[in-house]
Image (spheres, rainbow, N blue to C red):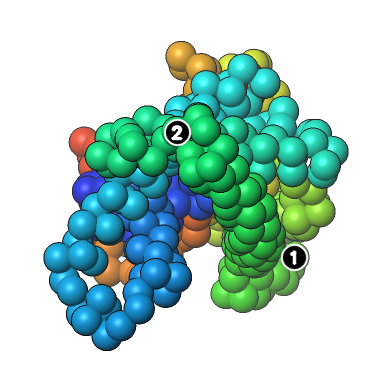
Amino acid sequence: MTADPKPSLWRDSRRLRASWHAWISAEAMPSGPEWLQWVWTLLFSAGLAVGFTVLGFVMNARKLSDWLNAGSWATWYWRNLVVCVTIGAVIHVMFSILIPLVGGRERILQWPRWGRTMFFSGLPLVGVVIGWVPGMWLAGMAGWVRLDWSQGGRVIGLTALMGLVISFLMHHWFAAKNRELVAERRATETQLRLLQGQIEPHFLFNTLANVHSLIDYDAPKAKAMLGAFTAYLRASLGGLRRESGPLEDELALAEAYLTVLRTRMEDRLRFEIHADAQARRVALPPMLLQPLVENAVHHGLEPKIDGGTVRVDASLREGFLVVEVRDDGVGPGASRRGGNGIALDNIRERLMAQYGDAASLSLEPADPGCLVTLRVPLAS
């Protein structure tokens, strides 16, 4: 196992992607720092300014020299940028204030489709109307904003119409992207759950081979091993049929898995499982704990001649369920067996899809061995 320092935000494509998904999707959990959400707003506004600048030249340029005038391009792009950023900032602030006021994203997702459509398309339209006048003033075009219908009224009416059209198109574009993200998230979740729920062939065959060999000279031990393996199969296969379950079930699965391995490794494997009663009732996506226990044995204890102990502790701390898997094995970096990074990455992907940036999974050296800490926010 290798140590697991947390990469910087800009080098962590998973966190950046999750933050972008949270910006464009109503169903994605908030992820990343709030300032990064502002970065997406500014970048999107800058892109819109490019579109409006090109549209303006298409509608107003009369000759080739107009198209080749770099100063005119810069002037009008700057003006459009100021207006778009102002409107984008107004819309961003309105969403930041109103989403918590109506109960958060989870509450909005319970609304009927027409309600979500009205909210996510109506709010940008209101933001366009509110932000257009100060945006025009900041861009140095205050003279365009007049109340007489002959000029200013038509401009305001045309702007409101454009805002309606743009809001409509943006809502449907975001809705399409949202459907893609939801489908991708569900497909990823299904795939990762299946990967986590797969029983490695060598574990299956070695266990059955051990049971077969034990039957002749130690039938009680063979019976105990087969019972533990049956409990493991029942728990692991049952977990694939539900979206979430109590930590109690995850602990039972881990205990069954460790019991099977202890029968094989004998005194080279010892384990302890401790969890508060309240922690045991917390709901989790299935198959999060078992891969961590498997890694502790496979990478930490099996390479060690005299084996060691795996200890699982679960408790509630400051609004989080904290699960620690500690082993006193060879420690991070000492095992040459591959696969640990893939398992941890799979778990992080599942946590990101379920909890956004609120959950975490860390791996660090212990003295001796290794400590893996899983932190999951409690439901509010």
The structure residue drawn at horizontal position 61% and vertical position 17%, both measured from the top left corner, is 101
Percent coordinates x, y for residue 54 in the rendering: 38, 69
Foreground label between 1 and 2:
2
Label located before the other in sequence (1 or 2): 2
The structure residue drawn at horizontal position 66% and vertical position 62%, both measured from the top left corner, is 176
Q: Quadrant of the C terminus?
A: top right
Percent coordinates x, y for residue 201 in the rendering: 62, 75
Q: Does residue 111 sit above or below 361 in this rendering?
A: above
Quarter of the image for residue 188 reads bottom right
Query: In terms of depth relative to the viewer, which is nearer, 190 or 27?
Result: 27
In 3D space, how far apart are the residues under numbered discs 1 and 2 (Cα atoms)? 94 Å
Which residue ends up furthest to the front in the rendered image? 150
Q: How many marks?
A: 2
Mark 2, Cα crowd under 10 Å, few <14 / some 14-19 / many 20+, is: some
What amino acid is labelled 2 in the image?
A: Arg
Quarter of the image for residue 283 reads top right
Percent coordinates x, y for residue 297 in the rendering: 44, 53
Give the numbered dot on residue 215: 1
Name the element at disc 1: helix
Name the element at disc 2: loop
Q: Quadrant of the N terminus?
A: bottom left
Quarter of the image for residue 355 reads top right
Where does label 2 land, which residue? 146
Q: Is residue 343 left or right of residue 135?
A: right
